Amino acid sequence: AWVHGDPRKVIYPTDSYGQFCGQKETLNENKTILFYFNILKCASPVVLINLQCPTTQLCVSKCPDRFATYIDVQASYRYRPDQWNYFRQFCKPGFNNPRKSVAQVLRDEDCPSMIIPSRPFLKRCFPDFSTKNGVLTVANQTTFKDGRGKTRNVTDLREAANGINNVLDARSVGIKIFEDYAISWYWILIGLFIAMLLSLLFLVLLRFTAGVLFWIFIFGVIGIIGYGIWHCYWEYDHLKGIPGSDLTVYDIGFQTDFKVYLQLRQTWLAFMIILCGVEIIIILMLIFLRNRIRIAIALLREGSRAIGYIMSTLFYPIVTFILIAICISYWAVTAVFLATSGEPVYKVMANQTLCKYANLTCDPETFNTSNVTKLCPGAQCTFAFYGGESLYHKYIFIFQLANAFVFLWLVNFAIALGQCTLAGAFASYYWAYRKPADIPLWPLFSSFGRAIRYHTGSLAFGALILAIVQLIRVILEYLDHKLKGTQNSFTRFLLCCLKCCFWCLEKFLKFINRNAYIMIAIYGKNFCTSAREAFFLLMRNVVRVAVLDKVTDFLLFLGKILVAGGVGVLAFFFFTQKIPVFAQEVPTLNYYWVPLLTVIIGSYLVAHGFFSVYAMCVDTLFLCFCEDLERNDGSTAKPYFMSASLHRILGKKKLSPKKA
């Protein structure tokens, strides 16, 4: 990929000769826009089949700004040479022979038969449409000459432009989203920075007031959802009687402007029902799990004490983030190089549907001397796409799968390295007989060194197993996407079952791997042995696992929701200009939900990075506690290593006094 790839194929539009428009240090350096000789041909179904308009395409420095035909320009070039000089900039490079007959010029496509007022869109010249008194016009005209003796309506141009727009619509939305990111990236970073501060504040407060903070937080979540229910009801009642507000989502269909849905009563009613359901579920869980939540809070307090002695663990997620960012960057760049590693492929573009050479590959250097031009008058050998017929090009899809597999493997390895490192640091805290006197000097760095030096193979093996399952899931999703609309009921059922089974398998493997890495950090055994011992240890303490581990995960998940929700509400009021102090600072966006969703998802990921340290700490302490109970009995010969407070929470035997 790195040898054959060329990312310029993605950045620049390509003309009929396979040359890039706007590429530096070439003849097209100042010609950044693609111009279609006869855009009317773009209404052909060939556009959708080959993603290429069957007309000559040329790189130009600017789009035409007037109506003109080659016939008129040729007739007047003697006494109005300025018109010819303007028109010929849209002809093939080097052509300057206005005496050549019109029939020959149009046959050889030396010049377009006409030019129309256009403007650049996605670096391509499109007719400059406007509406006047409800009538579609181009430069205030409803008709134009096509340069072939006919007068056409501008609606024909609309159909032709739609032929290309159907291909470029997705790219159009993508460009607008990219523009929104380019304008609002500064405010997105500020939102993520606020999320980081809130996460750190949450963890610092948890260090000292775990119980009080969690109960305040839980009732805060209930209050926020309650406010959301009230706001939805207020909007629902406020829209009553407003024309158009009683329409359904089905009536208006899909709209890229999210504000359209907010004008419907049905939208706010749906939001209110969803929030009411979430509120009821949270309240019921708090009622039935109140005692277990107290136990989980006490275990978190013990975990906060461990993190208090090893504060450097809070910043280790930054290392994992950097490693994953490197993996993503390598995968993305390699994927782009793979996708652009083909050679230019030229195909015969013919207007005649009966031309047997249509859509066949051709050589532009020998095309004019071949029989194709005689058998199919008007046919052209134009650039179609980048590809090839070699063995390498045939297996590019397989290479993309291999690249995706390596990406999944590396990401899982980076996560495994972080889990093993944190587990080793927290295990050194638990197995210190006198805390904090017996804790190693640099527990996090020592654990990281051990993981790299002794456990790389075990971590890579665990990551490999998980990556294989994830790749199978990716392939199943790809097959499901490709077979939509053509599959029968049995195929849909089979794919659904396979996707469900591999999803469950992935979740199970993540759980086993996580605990296996803890055992690897404690004993230094290989992956299979550690996974087996961790699994049976958890099965022997399955009730404690269900009560403590999962309730703790639930509380930490609520913490992520609070951080992401709080920053999301702040971002919503900011980007919708509802904060008067910052109203002038809000950038003008195509879709305000683009930075909003980015801030919400990013805030959740930031909070997840910090709270994952706590989750790993609790899991490690819990596994060490179970191991401590099985290995020791609290006697002088076999004393417990757990702290007295943790023993009171989970144990039943009395602690023997520890020696000083």
Image (cartoon, grey):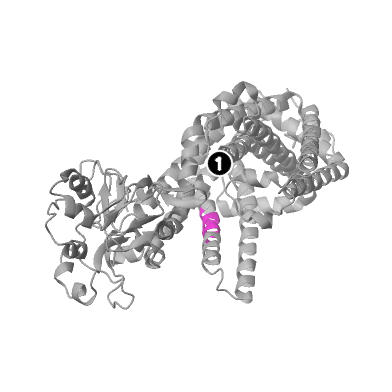
Q: Position of residue 158 (x, y in %)?
A: 43, 57
Q: Quadrant of residue 384?
A: bottom left
Q: How many marks?
A: 1
Q: Quadrant of residue 257?
A: top right
Q: Is residue 74 left or right of residue 465?
A: left
Q: Position of residue 543 (x, y in %)?
A: 80, 49
Which residue is painted at 56% across and 70% down in the image?
Answer: 485
The kind of residue tagged 1 is Tyr
Q: Badge 1: how crowded within 10 Å, few (<14), some, or many (20+)?
A: some
The image shows residue 315, relative to residue 483, as above or below, that is above
Residue ID for mark 1: 591
Q: Is residue 388 left or right of residue 648?
A: left
Please name whichever residue, 593 or 252, is drawn nearer the observer in this view of the structure.
252
Q: Position of residue 571 (x, y in %)?
A: 62, 32
Residue 20 visible in the displayed image: no
The magenta region covers 464-472
Q: Main secondary structure of the magenta part?
A: helix
Please name whichever residue, 446 or 598, is drawn nearer the observer in this view of the structure.
598
Q: Secondary structure at mark 1?
A: loop
Quarter that holds the N terminus: bottom left
